[in-house]
Amino acid sequence: MAQQHFEQRKDRVFLRAIQGEYNLKDELRRLRSLPRVRRAENIRFIDGPQAFSRHYIHPEDGLGQTLHLHLEEYAPGGRSQMHFHVNEAIFYILDGKGFEVHDGVRYEWEAGDVAVVPNHTVHQHNNADSQRPARVLVMKTKPMFIFMNMLFQKTVIPRPKEPSPNGQGFVPREDE
């Protein structure tokens, strides 16, 4: 038998079966029956005390099939958990200034910038301003990855349970 080397092998296709009870007519009927506008005043921020989230379209609510959209607010000097996930994420910086840490590399951002978190990147979001909050709009393809049974996520360092040094008593801006 001839020795076979990895480079000599044929390309392989890695794909999981996508199957289940999915009827396009029923799904379109369900989607069209859902609200087309979600009012911010009806969606509260969760988490904290350094990083807060307001989920407009979340995989669990069934409003969309391909997008997860949420607003993040970081307390003065606040930071998120260090984590990774298989799906990419796009952060549009609404206000403030801060930085990302991606696989140990620091990337600065400020209002008007877009921060891109590539697939499988260990990352953390940080507010660089110790006096003012920062706010970002986050868009992800998370529901599509869930559908394809490819959602792998892990927290590397948990979200802080204590306020940042200058964020004592900080609450997110619910009315903006």
Image: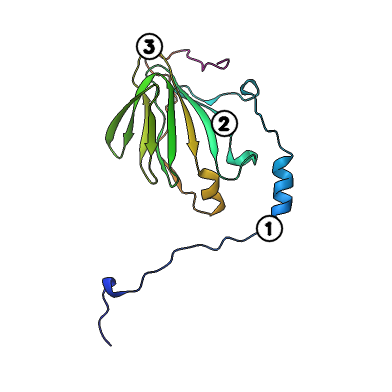
Q: Residues within 10 Å of mark 3 (few under 14, many from 20)?
A: few
Q: Is residue 170 rendered magenta in the image?
A: yes
Q: Nearer the N terminus, badge 1 or badge 2? A: 1
The three-letter code of the residue at mark 3 reads Gln
The three-letter code of the residue at mark 1 reads Glu
Residue lying at 68% horizontally and 58% vertically, measured from the top left: 21
Image position of 93 with respect to 86: above or below: above
Furthest-bottom residue in view?
1
Distance from disc 2 to disc 3, alpha carbons, whole Å, reads: 25 Å
Q: Nearer the N terminus, badge 3 or badge 1? A: 1
**Residue receiving disc 1:** 21
Residue lying at 53% horizontally and 31% vertically, measured from the top left: 70
Question: What secondary structure is marked by label 2?
Answer: strand
Image position of 123 with respect to 112: above or below: below
x then y, percent, for residue 152: 46, 49
**Mark identifier at residue 55:** 2
Distance from disc 3 to disc 1, alpha carbons, whole Å, reads: 51 Å
Question: What secondary structure is marked by label 3?
Answer: loop
